[in-house]
Each structure stands twice: as C-alpha cells, then as structure tokens.
Amino acid sequence: MSRLHKLVPMLGGLLLSKGGRRVAGRHAGKLALATLAYEVWRNRREGAKPQVTPKPAPEPRARWSGRRPR
C-alpha cells in the first residue's frame, strides 16, 4: 500500500486506550471483516475508473518498391 489507510489512525486510537483494547478484542472479527470489506470496496472503486492505456507505436509499413507483383 502506497498511501496510509484512513482506518489506521482510528484503529490505532482504539488500541491505545484500555477500553479500546477491550472493544477491539471483543469485536476483532467484525473489525477484520469491516476492514476487508472497505479494502474490497476501495479496490473495486479504483478499478471502475477508466484505465488509460497508451497506444503502442505503429509498426513501420513495408515500403512499396514500385514493382508490380507477378
């Protein structure tokens, strides 16, 4: 991941407090599932953007010699 998550500071704040650790421990599965759902949603949203693919350079064309094929 190149950029920081928006969820990282929130989860960090949860884990720093005693009550937050208790809540995080009790709901660890729900937090993991919510984080995974957020990741899937974000990746799908980024994938929905039109991909700009550079066109390959055209191949050089065969030059006509002026002679007619037999």
Image (tube, rainbow, N blue to C red):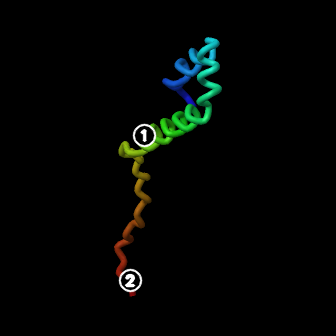
Taking depth in this image into account, of 44 and 11 the one nearest to the observer is: 11
Q: Which mark is residue 33?
A: none
Q: Which residue is mark 2?
A: 69
Q: In terms of secondary structure, where does tag 1 sit? A: helix
19 left or right, relative to 49:
right
Residue type, mark 2 in image: Pro
> Label 1: few (<14), some or many (≥20) within 10 Å?
few
44 left or right, relative to 4:
left
Which residue ends up furthest to the top in the rendered image?
A: 17
Sequence-wise first label, 1 or 2: 1
Numbered marks: total: 2
Disc 1 versus disc 2: nearer the observer: 1
Q: Quadrant of residue 30?
A: top right
Taking depth in this image into account, of 60 and 49 the one nearest to the observer is: 49
In the rendered image, residue 68, in percent from the top left (x then y), is placed at 35, 81
Taking depth in this image into account, of 50 and 23 the one nearest to the observer is: 23
In the rendered image, residue 23, in percent from the top left (x then y), is placed at 59, 22
Q: In terms of secondary structure, where does tag 2 sit? A: loop
Which residue ends up furthest to the bottom in the rendered image?
A: 70
Q: Which residue is mark 1?
A: 46
Taking depth in this image into account, of 50 and 19 the one nearest to the observer is: 19
> Mark 1 near mark 2, Cβ–Cβ under 8 Å?
no
Establish if 38 lies above or below 48.
above
Query: Which quarter of the figure is the N terminus placed in?
Result: top right
Query: Which quarter of the figure is the C terminus placed in?
Result: bottom left
Residue at the spot 54% in from the left edge and 34% down from the top edge: 35
14 left or right, relative to 70:
right
Residue type, mark 1 in image: Glu
